[in-house]
Image (tube, rainbow, N blue to C red):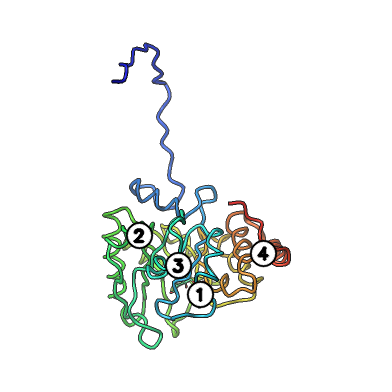
Amino acid sequence: MADADASEAKHYAADVPMRSEPFFLKGSNNLDWGMKNRLAAIFNPSSGRTVMLAFDHGYFLGPTSGLERVDLNIVPLIRYADTLMLTRGILRTSIPPTYSRGIVLRASGGPSILKELSNEEIAVSIDEAIRLNVAAMAVQVFIGGEYETRSVHNMTRLVDMGNRHGIATLAVTAVGKDMVRDAKYMRLATRMCAELGATYVKTYYVEQGFETVTAACPVPIVIAGGKKLPESEALQLAHNAIQQGAAGVDMGRNIFQSEAPVAMIQAVRSVVHENLSPNEAYDLYLELKEGGEDSFDS
Ligand code: 5RP
């Protein structure tokens, strides 16, 4: 049996108020400890931002360019990401379970590119999400789409299930081909997702008024990279979004379809976490591309 504590010298520091620090992420202060802990595995607590490596595209696109072999093309990149966004099939088959950052699990699906994409259902159970130890579940929300209400309902059901277990919900605002991608639409879509409970929201960057989109959304916004651009333009896009209030990027094709993906993801990190200018980040990209692609100390 341990000795009873006989010391008279106690240090209660009764005159020092207990520390009570706000959580670093926008709109997240009133979440529970488990949820905050998971969010800290998605967002870097030092910068308050994230580089999400997105490679869930196969859930409706199949083996798109750059994702033919996740084991060969993506696994070498994962050490540079703050978090991975992927499906459970790829997680189980291709990602080493020693990966210790957050997992953002694609949790909606159904239609392929051959059909109406907004006709999605929830595609994973909460038991499965817990079993896979994920930090967040990602769900597509099609504001203005044919199955708008269904997709919003998918999101609110995932929010309810996730909140019960401290798992975050990422609402992914999907913009139909015929819709105008402007700040007015993005404000509507992102604000609806936040009001209906999303922990954070992914959207697209828009050239005019993106700062009004981030200002009007009470939870963090990350931007999708979208279609492959020249590397310098993708870095400019990331820079603009971050400087206008985005809390990170959820980038796929502009990294894994790059000529030098390992160099590109590090250049993206420098924009997101170190506020490098697009030119400085592009120089870093070229330097890493030519010099063996590694500057990272993980
Ligand atoms: C697919 C997605 C992607 O994860 C998202 O669009 C990010 O990838 P990219 O940068 O290639 O656009 O949600 O539905």
Front residue (pair 24, 206)? 24
Question: Residue 146 occupies which quadrant of the picture?
Answer: bottom left
- Seen as rendered, the residue at the extreme front is 1
- State whether label 3 is within 8 Å of ligand 1: no
Give whichever of discs 4 and 1 has the lower sequence position: 1
Give whichever of discs 4 and 3 has the lower sequence position: 3
Query: Circle 2 sits on which residue?
Result: 132
Q: Which mark is residue 69?
A: 1
**Which amino acid lies under the numbered mark 2 shown in the image of this protein?**
Leu
- State whether label 4 is within 8 Å of ligand 1: no
- Seen as rendered, the residue at the extreme bottom is 114
* Of the two numbered discs 3 and 2 in the rendering, the one whose residue sits closer to the viewer: 3
Question: Residue 153 occupies which quadrant of the picture?
Answer: bottom left
Relative vertical location of residue 4 with respect to residue 156 in this rendering, above or below: above
- State whether label 1 is within 8 Å of ligand 1: no
Query: Circle 4 sits on which residue?
Result: 278
* Of the two numbered discs 1 and 2 in the rendering, the one whose residue sits closer to the viewer: 1
Give whichever of discs 1 and 3 has the lower sequence position: 1
